[in-house]
Amino acid sequence: MNHEMLIRGGTVLTVDPELGDLPRGDVLVRDDRIVAVGPDIPAAGAQVVDATDMIVMPGLVDTHRHLWQSATRQIAADWTLGQYAERMLGVIGPRFTAEDVYIADLMGALECLNGGVTTVLDWSHIMNTPEHADAAVHGLADSGMRAVFAYGSPKSPAAKWYASDLTRVAGTYCSSKDQLLTLALASLGPEFSSVQETVEDVRLARELDIPTSLHVGAGMLGQRRAVTRMARSGLLGPDIVYVHCNTCTDEELRLIAESGGHASISPRVEMQMGHGYPATGRLIAAGSSPA
């Protein structure tokens, strides 16, 4: 038997140009799919959720969050980017056990859900061991949210087992793209590693048919011209998410847009840590739709 849930009588923000917003409407969910949106939907036998005087809308999507750092909430509230790299990645991260990662990912994912974020890309550069990867996956899965687990190395060069373990995780946990948990590669990119390592990362991700997310234009590191060097290596494409982009040149932003790439901005932390002014307007001018 199908499981049906009817969300009834709410103010429905459909985010659909054809349906528009409904001052009073219903949303019918069957199993894991929304099957109908409209006023007064008949659904005998469905579980009814009374949404009177409430807003019904799609969940928010966070395209870049380091969930393993949820356990250290606000510890970096006054750090620069350099201090973050030195203290979080150099001191705190190496001390994280697999159990620490499980707890932090579960807690961080539940915090997302509590704030209306129902999909997150977890940029997880905390793979101290393969067990850390298993723990992160289980934390995300146990939360029940939709997540893209972006598997990353905490340092350059990556451990020798890094590539083979990413392949293991792909085959063990992410055999289908039609599931709540899917996989990406969190590459350190040319600003935090080398171009050759980035080439190897992107090549591996494409072999596994998963997207790659990497940081570019992060403050003074942007002078390394990551996007330009990636373009010369033939790496740009629609399967790459470029995070921050603050000090990328306008030409680099154009290269991202023309290649079909995606941009993810983090305005608050960028302004705080010294990445530079958020690139939102310049990205839009270049033809991107930043998240």
Image (cartoon, rainbow, N blue to C red):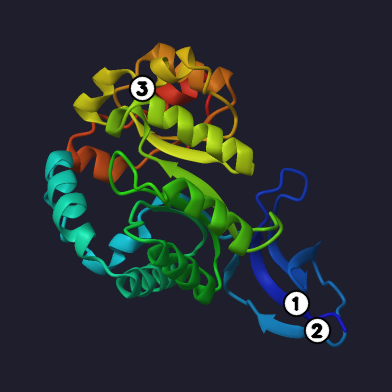
Residue at horizontal 42%, vertical 70%? 135
Q: Amino acid at mark 1?
A: Leu
Sequence order check, earlier mark of 2 and 1: 1
Q: CA distance from mark 3 to mark 2?
A: 52 Å
The answer to whether 69 appears left or right of 234 in the picture is left
Neighbor class of circle 1 (other Cα within 10 Å; few <14, some 14-19, many 20+) is many
The total number of labels drawn is 3
Q: Secondary structure at mark 3?
A: helix
Q: CA distance from mark 1 to mark 3?
A: 48 Å
Residue at horizontal 75%, vertical 85%? 47
Numbered mark located on residue 264 in the image = none
- x then y, percent, for residue 252: 42, 16
The residue wearing badge 2 is: 46
Q: Amino acid at mark 2?
A: Ala
The residue wearing badge 3 is: 226
Which one is in front, 271 or 209? 209
Give the image quarter of residue 76: bottom left
Which one is in front, 229 or 271? 229
Q: CA distance from mark 2 to mark 1?
A: 6 Å
Give the image quarter of residue 175: bottom right
Q: Secondary structure at mark 2?
A: loop
The residue wearing badge 1 is: 6
Which one is in front, 253 or 271? 253
- Which residue is outermost to the front? 160
Neighbor class of circle 3 (other Cα within 10 Å; few <14, some 14-19, many 20+) is many
Q: Amino acid at mark 3?
A: Ala
Residue at horizontal 37%, vertical 73%? 107
